[in-house]
Amino acid sequence: MSTALSLEPLFRHSIGFDRFSDLFDRALEGSSASTFPPYNIEKHGENQYRIVLAVAGFSEEDLSIKLENGVLTVTGTKADDKNDQNITYMHHGIGRDSFKLTYRLEDHIEVQGANLENGLLVIDLLREIPEEAKPREIEINSLGSGKSQLHKIESRNESTA
């Protein structure tokens, strides 16, 4: 008896969801996700989202935000301070390590902007679904009520030839 988990039943009636299957595979591999810096992912309304990262001690110059192929990457690199050589920490609880966090964004999610205030990096996201991707009603034509659309097209093509 195999103990492997198969997602095949989930995708039986799905077309074009290969990337979704890959996402499940990566999630099941085991996570080595970083817990630094702490962050929140918030939903504000139906189509508005926000990522809030606690980046105390990092300046705008130390942070980088990039979006490539639907993956949002936030990187923080703290420059070495020359003054730290003369400091002995009794307790060192404020993180100064470099970090790199990635977030896979769903289709049609756009980054609206980012700001850094009071040690919090806030990234605003908005889902903008184009008209052609919104749900629409598909008309069903009855074949019994006359010629089918295929016959109409074929007869039109024959008359123009």
Image (cartoon, helix red, strand yellow):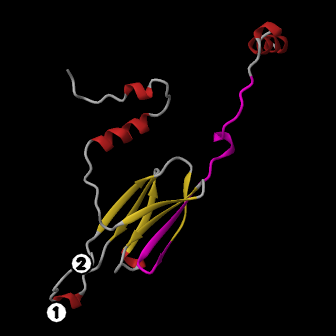
Q: Earlier in the sequence, mark 2 or mark 1?
A: 1
Residue 30 at x, y percent in the picture: 25, 46
Q: Is residue 61 above or below residue 41?
A: below
Q: Where is the C terminus found, in terms of image quarters?
A: top right
What is the quadrant of residue 147 in the picture? top right
Residue 109 image point, x, y percent: 54, 53
- Quadrant housing residue 110: bottom right
* Residue in the picture at 82% in, 14% down: 156
Magenta region, residue range: 115-139
Q: Is residue 130 above or below residue 86?
A: above
Residue 66, percent from left and from top: 44, 62
Q: Look at the numbered disc 2 and give the secondary structure of its residue.
A: loop
Residue 117 belongs to the span the image colors magenta: yes
Residue 93 bears which disc, if any? 2
**Compared to 152, does 104 lie above or below?**
below
**123 or 69: which is nearer to us?**
123
| Structural crowding at the residue carrying mark 2, measured as other residues with C-alpha within 10 Å and reported as few (<14), some (14–19) or many (≥20) | few
Q: Are marks 2 and 1 in contact (CB under 8 Å)?
A: no
Q: Amino acid at mark 1?
A: Asn
Residue at 41% x, 55% y is 103
- Dot 1 lies on which element? helix
The three-letter code of the residue at mark 2 reads: Gly
In the image, 47: left or right of 19?
right
Residue 45 image offset from top left, x and y in percent: 60, 58
Which corner quadrant holds the N terminus? top left
Label drawn at residue 1? none
> Based on the displayed image, in which of its 4 quarters is residue 62 positioned?
bottom left
Is residue 65 left or right of 151 when viewed as pictured? left
Query: What's the CA distance linking mark 2 and mark 1?
Result: 18 Å
- The residue labelled by disc 1 is 86
In the image shown, does 148 or 1 lie closer to the viewer?
Answer: 1
